[in-house]
């Protein structure tokens, strides 16, 4: 089960979308940003999704402070739409926290869920082949 914590704006919408896309493979809940980032840092959640008006500021500020800049990725910002290849690369490289604008929820969340599920499938296949 992949555990995702959601913070910021429109958390109910993001949780519904992520849960619907991930089905039984994901567990999604909302928390305030400091709690959500702490859950990831302590291993109680696997990923952090944050949404705000800009995609980088409020969406990722606490995650950057707690997890470090190198574990966070801005998936979309004002004037910069999410790019599937960049999201896939970010997940594959070990990013754990993702920020995006509320305007891009409907495009970013499916890309994130798809990339995360694929990454975990590949990791499971590598473990089985070992």
Image (cartoon, rainbow, N blue to C red):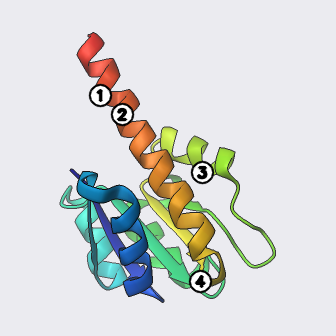
Query: Nearest the camera: 59 or 127?
Result: 127
Does residue 55 appear to the left or right of 71 in the view shown?
A: right
Does residue 70 appear to the left or right of 2 in the view shown?
A: right
Determine which quarter of the picture holds residue 30: bottom left
Determine which quarter of the picture holds residue 117: top left
Residue ID for mark 1: 124
Between marks 2 and 3, how big is the CA–CA gap? 16 Å
Image coords of residue 123 (percent x, y): 35, 29
Earlier along the polypeptide chain: callout 1 or callout 3? 3
Between marks 1 and 2, how big is the CA–CA gap? 5 Å
Mark 2 falls on what kind of element?
Answer: helix
On residue 121, the disc is: 2
Between marks 1 and 4, how big is the CA–CA gap? 32 Å
Which residue: 66% across, 50% down? 84
Residue ID for mark 3: 87
Earlier along the polypeptide chain: callout 2 or callout 3? 3
Q: Name the front one of labels 2 and 3.
A: 2
Residue ID for mark 4: 102
Observer able to see residue 97: yes
Which residue: 74% across, 67% down? 81
């Amino acid at each position: 089960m992949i555990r995702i914590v959601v913070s910021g704006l429109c958390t109910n919408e993001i949780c519904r979308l992520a849960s619907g896309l991930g089905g039984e493979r994901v567990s999604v809940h909302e928390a305030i940003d400091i709690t959500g980032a702490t859950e990831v840092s302590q291993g109680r959640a696997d990923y952090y999704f944050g949404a705000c008006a800009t995609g980088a500021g409020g969406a990722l500020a606490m995650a950057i402070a707690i997890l470090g800049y190198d574990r966070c990725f801005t998936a979309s910002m004002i004037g910069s739409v999410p790019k599937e290849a960049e999201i896939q690369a970010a997940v594959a490289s070990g990013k754990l926290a993702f920020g995006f604008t509320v305007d891009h929820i409907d495009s970013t969340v499916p890309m994130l869920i798809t990339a995360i599920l694929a990454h975990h499938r590949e990791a499971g296949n590598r473990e089985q082949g070992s």
